[in-house]
Image (tube, helix red, strand yellow):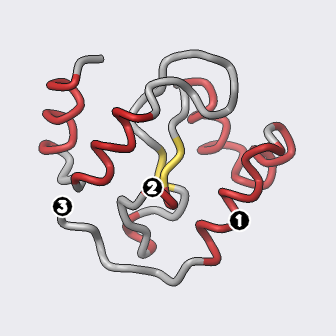
Amino acid sequence: MTRDDVFVHCLRNRYGADYAQYWMDHLVCEAGCEKPSQPPHHLRTRGAGGDDSPENLLALCVEDHAIIGTMGRQEFVRRYPHLKRKIEAAFERPRGLLCAG
């Protein structure tokens, strides 16, 4: 994934600059598998009031993104306890407006 690829993806999907920077800073899965990360996962979705801030993002590989998406965050936290605090903190934050950039 090149820097240009990241920014093209972010523009197409209307992600803010914080999102693009987070992805560039986290090119490896944060679950610890050392695989390349995919577009960062929004812990609280944008539709549910989440934003593109680093506190609401988690860089995951394809497999771990599927785990959190299909099994939910509680099962994900059981598998990856080192991410528990970050995940909980994202839901403790007040719902915000989308970060425009």
Give the amino acid type for the residue marked by disc 1 in the picture.
Answer: Glu
Q: Mark 3 belongs to which amino acid?
A: Gly
Compare marks 3 and 1 and give the one earlier in the sequence: 1
Which kind of residue does numbered mark 2 sit on?
Pro
Residue drawn at (56%, 16%) of the image:
35
Quick check: 84 left or right of 67? right
Give residue 101's position: percent from left, percent from top.
18, 61
Against 41, residue 88 (above or below) is below
Nearer to us in this view, 69 or 78? 78
Question: Which residue is painted at 22% across and 52% down in the image?
Answer: 17
Report how far apart the C-alphas of labels 3 and 1 lie in the structure: 25 Å
Q: Which residue is tagged 3? A: 101
Task: Compare residues 12 and 21 and report the one nearer the observer.
Answer: 21
- Classify mark 2: residues with Cα within 10 Å, few (<14), some (14-19) or many (20+): some
The spot of residue 10 in percent (x, y) is 21, 42
Label located before the other in sequence (2 or 3): 2
* Location of residue 81 by image quarter: top right
Tag shown at residue 54: 2
Residue matched to label 1: 88
The percent coordinates of residue 40 (x first, y second) are 43, 41
Report how far apart the C-alphas of labels 2 and 3 lie in the structure.
Answer: 13 Å
Q: Residue at x 63, y 31 (%)?
A: 64
| 75 versus 26 height, above or below | below
Whether 86 is drawn above or below 76: the answer is below
Q: Which mark is residue 74?
A: none
Specify the quadrant that holds the N terminus: top left
Residue at 72 percent of width and 47 percent of height: 83
Give the Cα distance between marks 1 and 2.
14 Å
Mark 3 falls on what kind of element? Answer: loop
